[in-house]
Amino acid sequence: MSSTSRALLSLVLSSAACFAAQPATPHSDASLRGYNSDGARAEREWEEKFRAIPSPENMREYMRRLSAYPHHIGSPYDKDNAEWILAQFRSWGLDAHIETFRVLFPTPKLRTLELVAPGHYAAKLAEPPVPGDPTSSQTAQQLPPYNAYSIDGDVTGPLVYVNYGIPADYEELDRNGISVKGALVIARYGGSWRGIKPKVAAEHGAIGCIIYSDPKDDGYAQGDVFPEGAWRPPFGAQRGSVMDMPVYPGDPLTPGIGATADAKRLPISEATTLTKIPVLPVSYGDAQPLLAELKGPVAPEAWRGSLPITYHMGPGPAKVHLALKFNWDMVDIRDVIATIPGGDDKDEWIIRGNHYDAWVNGAEDPISAQVALLEEARSMAELRKQGWQPRRTVIFTAWDGEEEGLLGSTEWVEQHAAELKQHAAVYINSDGNGRGFLGVSGSHTLEQFMNGIERDVEDPETKLSVRERLKLHRISEAKTEDRKELRNRADLRIGALGSGSDYTAFIDHLGVASLNLGYGGEDGGGIYHSAYDDFYWYTHFADTNFVYGRALAQTAGTAAMRLTDADVLPFQFSDFADTIHKYVDEVKALWKEKHDEIEERDRELDEGVFPAITDPKKVLVPPKREEIPPYLNFAPLETATDTLSRSAEAFEKAFKDSPQPPAQELNAKLMETERVLTDAVGLPRRPWFQHQIYAPGFYTGYGVKTLPGVREAIEEKHWDEASHEIEVVSAVLRNEAALLDEMTALLKK
Amino acid sequence: MSSTSRALLSLVLSSAACFAAQPATPHSDASLRGYNSDGARAEREWEEKFRAIPSPENMREYMRRLSAYPHHIGSPYDKDNAEWILAQFRSWGLDAHIETFRVLFPTPKLRTLELVAPGHYAAKLAEPPVPGDPTSSQTAQQLPPYNAYSIDGDVTGPLVYVNYGIPADYEELDRNGISVKGALVIARYGGSWRGIKPKVAAEHGAIGCIIYSDPKDDGYAQGDVFPEGAWRPPFGAQRGSVMDMPVYPGDPLTPGIGATADAKRLPISEATTLTKIPVLPVSYGDAQPLLAELKGPVAPEAWRGSLPITYHMGPGPAKVHLALKFNWDMVDIRDVIATIPGGDDKDEWIIRGNHYDAWVNGAEDPISAQVALLEEARSMAELRKQGWQPRRTVIFTAWDGEEEGLLGSTEWVEQHAAELKQHAAVYINSDGNGRGFLGVSGSHTLEQFMNGIERDVEDPETKLSVRERLKLHRISEAKTEDRKELRNRADLRIGALGSGSDYTAFIDHLGVASLNLGYGGEDGGGIYHSAYDDFYWYTHFADTNFVYGRALAQTAGTAAMRLTDADVLPFQFSDFADTIHKYVDEVKALWKEKHDEIEERDRELDEGVFPAITDPKKVLVPPKREEIPPYLNFAPLETATDTLSRSAEAFEKAFKDSPQPPAQELNAKLMETERVLTDAVGLPRRPWFQHQIYAPGFYTGYGVKTLPGVREAIEEKHWDEASHEIEVVSAVLRNEAALLDEMTALLKK
């Protein structure tokens, strides 16, 4: 599901240096945080042995097998894959089982989209087989293009083009005097997670929503189209879930609890995460005849795609008819769970997961990273035979039902919430892989740790460490003002986790420190969630020789091992505190931006700017006057952040100075450090999301909002709520600082 | 010819407040700079009478007449128009005559462009008549699409797409390992004046050049295409001159002298302003089949247009054949000159000009502004009958041969250089007009003066003063940091003059203070230099009721009258000095930017950034190491600018304090104030361009370069030349300051 993981790569460049306990060039010394020197030496030897094992050839064969047929949930081949994965784990000597949940899964019974005036066009709504690509012709087994958890509907009305269909686009429509009330909207993919588009459209009164893939974004404007190139052909369409995941992910009928066979379920009518209006994804081949019949204002430059038409906003004269009916079935999903039992600290769990279900054949999404996970498991099993005994328990999870709404991981986490709260130390996720640069997002208490891993994995193309390559890449892309930090800060920054993959329940719901890993940036393509994401495409246009598959196995596997074997869990808090400082600066700047923007707009209304600039041949509705935002008291947040920094530094110093830290007592508290960042009340209007530092945006869907309670209150101009949320976040940060102080005291005992 | 005049509108927003003698709201008092209070009152009365005369209906009829047939130079209808304009001037009682020059004018004998592999496509190279648009079918009289002053040639070779074909684009090609040596380039219109494209292509070894209009820039991406809308239809093409005008404009055979019948002429082989390679403009209908057959790297995002293809850079496999032959004829061109003789100061001339020749029917370019000029002349003739006697002589000039390279104005200025140096006070130009906001570019000694005019002309749509509307428009478009100045500076800034219209010889060659005026910003279209720029198009999509034609007549006419009647010429120097300060800051920042850019690039070469970021599946040629720029001594320039500011302030104070300034002595010196900004040696490698503050860019063509000697030396990294040019400009500014000091002394006598 994750199309964002690679994009995150570019989001993590920023300012301000910080204290860091880990020396910048640990290759020159063999020390590892959380290990004594003998332990570090032994660990490095095991890790090197580990990294020699994963095999590109194996990964190619796993991919060929797992992507041989469409394998969405409820399909025979998805079940077959689960059993095959289970058999692999077992064949390597791992203790493995399948855990089954029962979930609501709508599949299309009727899909009709037609232009009814002027003229007539019946959308094809099908992806033609491509000569030479064998699996593209498995049309009988494929799910056709549709959006899961759209409601049924049969609507006819004028069409309005809404660009990405995010709130700012509706402001632009307002300025042009265009309402979508009673209309169908057509939005292009991009700019937000797809589920936001029908949600916002419905909020504005639209009666139906069409989402299309503009060739500007992933079609011919980007490169040659499949099968000549990697990009979306005219009738390729993007399937995908439109469940309201920013409210809660997982089975819509069992919020907050595991969807076991006998779980207490909501009736469908009470599930709040289904869409409010019918929604259907289409190709640009099907979108063009509709868009070409729009009139009304010419769309602003930023809205224009690459179709050879004039993009108008409408409404109409294009009138369209959309009819959708779904089979509202219950299906079984199967998570495959394999365990390597730990030793001294077996009750502390390091969990490594990736989903295996797909929309169609899913070679890239998710199999390209699932095959790395499989090689990690096989390699660790191999090491065990050679005598390696992990200190902690390693759990490999192959999730089902991720595509529909993180079903497999969410239900498993909800089902095992109590155990996980007690035992889960870290969750490491991946979800697709490609060529290029390592993308890392996750808990910033693991930022320094991941820099250590990045130093020890070799980039297959340049033979540099992946960290060095990433750093030089960032330098080459950076703005002048950001280069100094890139060159001088001890650790490369990592991104924050939004949503869009299986880490969501771990970090956002439970507060389990999490990571998401994947390579990318040198490949690209337009086959996401289409029938063309298959073995033929992947082996022609992506990581064709699976060397980045191996690099991902080496990266995630080394991270899992190093976390598993450490005497003391290698969480580090100076980078975390530095990051929080950055977020606090951002929300302060955001408030200032809103304040200045509203003040300026009100001033321009006073000056008469809008009547003066209006072209009488066009409609220009002046913006509404708004009250100038009140000043907010950020002092509690700033105080708490400073306290956190001081506590983090004191902990670092005490930890460095402690020759023999009390590992067990420390680890118990270290596992708590992410937990205390949650608040049981959850975020405003979405209690399932309990983490107070990271959350997917209510109006971005996948895209992260850091300090989400505060940030979104400011974005939405809920000033009282912003003040309240400042207090909530401040309390959480004070709790974190207090926990650090307790650990510092332990170290000083 | 001017497609840039309206774009200039947006270029003149910037920082720093300044002293200004003129109060911000002179409507509340009747004072006028350079007039005593009685004179100001009388002047205001005459101006009000004047502004009531120009008639939209007349302008519509003039346009219908002047654009009824194609009227390029050498055509019967161009001659007919000259005689008709002459007759109009005479019918209003003006003393008028035609002045004839003889110029080189190539017209096409053979135009062939074909894709010869893979496949075959013969370019149509013709603009089809449009049903409903009567003049579009006058194909027998039309010049077909071609670029004047391209050399003859017959070349075949691989094709390379070079984006806009400016120097930075060739750097990008270099980074991709692509050479244009022996190839034909295809460049899109935009990003520079068209003549720059074959010039830079030839410098890089290309053997031919095709220029096309991408639909992104003025076709369907911008709006509905003609005749449904205003934008370029698939087979519309942009004609235009490709003479190397930044070296010298005017007849290529008579640089620096008037092209009279008996002038001494260069042989064609020695004319340096012809292109070095053959060049042809084509429509996007003709370009698409060629571009679609390119392979090689996908063009960078900023290079991609709106055709439904993947934009590749090449070279090839597309192979094209271009053959061009021209009739290298000599033709007569006719400037129509009309005079209103002055009174007391009849030897000081206020000149008002616009060209009347066109590429085809030329309703917008240039007739839309020529008709304003005609109404100005008629209105002033009317006032004369009512008793108005201008103090200075007003000369109306209707130029011929502007399109081919400012032929009519340049030859006239060269022929009359000695008289003009002695008598010309101000030249006021226009060249096309549309709906919206007033665009003003010109000598900054006239900035305050033009603000006064803008206060007195009413915008026909909003009934605000055009100044107020322009100010509010700029506020609405401004960046935050620029709004304060917009709100607080006494005068709205005006743009600087580059080239592209008939002011060039006046200001750049002779140093005659100049202005260029025109309305725009609410209209737009893709008919520039095509057969579709005609009466039908203009009256459907532009200033359809000619109310902005009237506004232009009111603006330019009021300016001409107020300059003509003043006791003391209303040049003001504080705004000018403030502007020079800004330019000096800019060239200093430009040096710093070059310095930092080279330093950073060299550092990245040391760090190994380029091998690290290279995708082995693509070519990436690292940039060349360059020597870090030496520090430049800007002190002379800064000292001279400060001196100028002090002298300007002293003059302002003395002028304000002088109850009866010595007008005649002052005026003689005021006319010198623009002349002393020239240097007889001219700019490096182009001695014809003598102005040291303003020039068209050597590599932008129309786009202005201020402090051109210094700025272009820094851009081209000629560090010794930059130091030399700093001295040249400093001397010119010191001379200006000294002249101001002389005037101050006169006032204090």
Image (spheres, coloured by chain):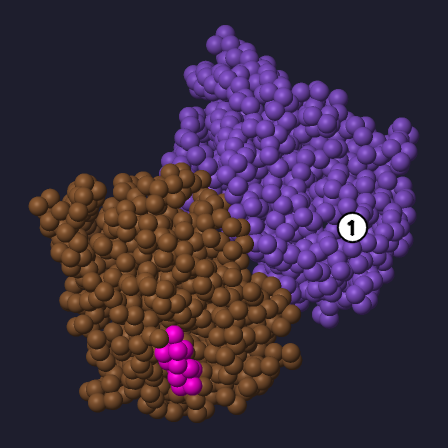
Chain colours: A brown, B purple
Q: Is residue A273 above or below residue B328?
A: below
**Chain letter of the residue beneath label 1 in the structure image:** B
Neighbour class for label 1 at 10 Å: few (<14), some, many (≥20)?
many
Q: Position of residue B516 (x, y in %)?
A: 61, 39
**Residue A477 x, y percent position in the rendering:** 48, 47
Residue in the picture at 32% in, 78% down: A96
Q: Which residue is mark 1?
A: B183
Q: Residue at point 47% right, 62% down?
A: A550
Q: Position of residue B8 (x, y in %)?
A: 57, 43
Q: Is residue A735 left or right of residue A194?
A: left
Q: Nearer the viewer, residue A642 or B561?
A: A642
| Residue that sits furthest to the front in the current view | A386
Disc 1 residue type (three-letter): Ala
Q: Between residues A526 and B18, which one lies in front from this camera angle? A: A526
A673 lies left or right of B379: left
Q: Quadrant of residue A680?
A: bottom left
Range of residues picked out in magenta: A78-92
Is residue A475 highlighted in magenta? Answer: no
Is residue B732 visible in the rendered image? The answer is: no
Look at the image and tell me whether residue A93 can be seen: yes
Q: Residue at x 44, y 56 (%)?
A: A438
Q: Could you tell me which secondary element the residue under label 1 belongs to? A: loop
Residue found 33% across the figure and 87% down from its top: A332
Q: Nearer the viewer, residue B534 or A244?
A: A244
Q: Residue furthest left?
A: A749
Q: Is residue B150 left or right of residue B32?
A: right
Residue placed most toward the observer, A91 or A626: A91
Question: In the drawing, does residue A696 fall left or right of residue A303?
Answer: left
Q: Quadrant of residue A649?
A: top left
